[in-house]
Image: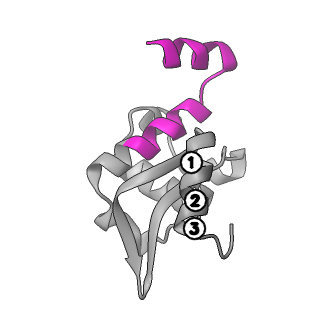
Amino acid sequence: MPNQTNDQLATESAKDPNTVELETPIRRGDKEITAITLRKPKSGELRGLSLTELLQMQVDALSALLPRISSPALLKADMPHIDPADMVAMGTVVARFLLTKAQQADFLNA
């Protein structure tokens, strides 16, 4: 998503359940990131991580995975500064990625 404006990101997030509108934007120099889109990780991107810890939304596990699957890319240096509400929102998206389609339907209806 290079060179997208905040309005374009907001429009996408309204359509894309994998896009999280940040409660607290991330500042990088003169740029402000207001939304993060996550994509389903491949097995290689899960290396060294515990699926159980990801499903439990443990911060260390999410902090290792999110930079691997985010757009715009989160940096490891960003992770300690992310608003806890934003971490939970992104963790919820990650947890949904790890469920089967049937489990996802139950998860969304719960």
Question: Which residue lies at the image location 63% right of the left edge and 41% below the top edge?
Answer: 15
Give the residue type that dot 2 points to: Leu
- Few, some or many C-alpha atoms within 10 Å of disc 2 (few <14, some 14-19, many ≥20)? many
Instruction: Describe the colour scheme in one phrase.
Output: one colour
Placement of 63 over or under 50, stated as above or below = below
| Labels 1 and 2 touching (C-beta < 8 A) | yes
Question: Considering the numbered disc 1 on the image, is that residue within a helix, a strand or a loop?
Answer: helix
Q: CA distance from mark 3 to mark 2?
A: 14 Å
Identify the residue under disc 3: 73
Extent of the magenta region? 89-110
Label 2 belongs to which residue?
A: 9
For the question of whether residue 84 can be seen, the reply is yes
Q: Quadrant of the N terminus?
A: bottom right
Structural distance between the alpha carbons of marks 3 and 1? 16 Å
Q: Position of residue 76 (x, y in %)?
A: 45, 70
Identify the residue at image location x=45%, y=36%.
92
Let me know if residue 101 is in the magenta part: yes
At label 3, counting other C-alpha atoms closer than 10 Å, the crowd grade (few under 14, some 14-19, many 20 or more) is: some
Can residue 16 be spotted in the picture?
A: no
The answer to the question of whether label 3 and label 1 lie on touching residues, with beta carbons closer than 8 A, is: no
- Ranked by sequence position, the earlier of labels 3 and 1 is 1
